Amino acid sequence: MNTLSLAVLLATTFAGQNAPKTKHVEVNPNTKQAVVTQAEARAVLLRVEKIFVTVLQVSPNSKVTIADSSAPVTRAQVVSDFNRLFDLGRPKFKFTPIPVPFDAKRLTLKDPKQLVSLKKLISFGCVAKIGPVAAGANDSLTVQAFGDSVGFFMSRIAELTHMPSTKWTPGLKGD
């Protein structure tokens, strides 16, 4: 397990231990269509950034662009911040992967600037090519879709910033 994966695991395991005491709210399991607010997305992406800074030992190059608002977060906003975090971690990449092939006609993001970023993120394997961020029907993201997208992104960054042992990776032996 590489250090970024370990940090993610520890951060998620111990995240609630030092959190301020809040009133417990029962969540209806039938509300699968609940959308993520900008404030919630901002909080998650700030935690991701903190993990990048700690584990990858990088300095933030810009601030989170998502506002602290109760409005639903948009896919374009998520792509913007994923791109920012990608650029933050990129100097620590250990290899350049083979580009992921994808059908650009399936992408439903309307913002032309973020579409360029989305294509880059997909080609590096950081965003699912037919996932909710890239090809979703709605502009907002459900809690499950956002969580899956963040997990997908973090796992790929962990892979890109880690060089496995040549002992266990035959392709790296150079025989």
Image (cartoon, grey):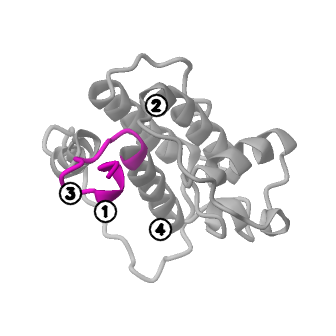
- Say left or right for 23 vs 153: left
Note whether residue 72 is visible.
no
Q: Nearer the viewer's eye, disc 1 or disc 2?
A: 2
- Residue 44 in the image, given as x and y percentages of width and height: 42, 43
**Residue type at numbered disc 2:** Gly
On the image, the x and y values in percent for residue 3 come to 22, 40
**In what element is the residue under mark 1?**
loop
Q: Which-is-in-front pick, marks 4 and 3?
A: 3
Which mark sits nearer the N-terminus, 1 or 2? 1
- Residue located beneath label 2 in the image: 89
Tags 4 and 3 touching, CB below 8 Å: no
Badge 4 local density, few (<14 within 10 Å), some, or many (20+)? some
- Residue under numbered circle 1: 25
The residue at which mark 3 appears reads as 168
Closer to the chain start, of discs 4 and 1, is 1
Circle 2: element type? helix
Part of the protein shown in magenta: 159-175
Label of residue 144 in the image: 4
Label 1 vs label 3, nearer the camera: 3
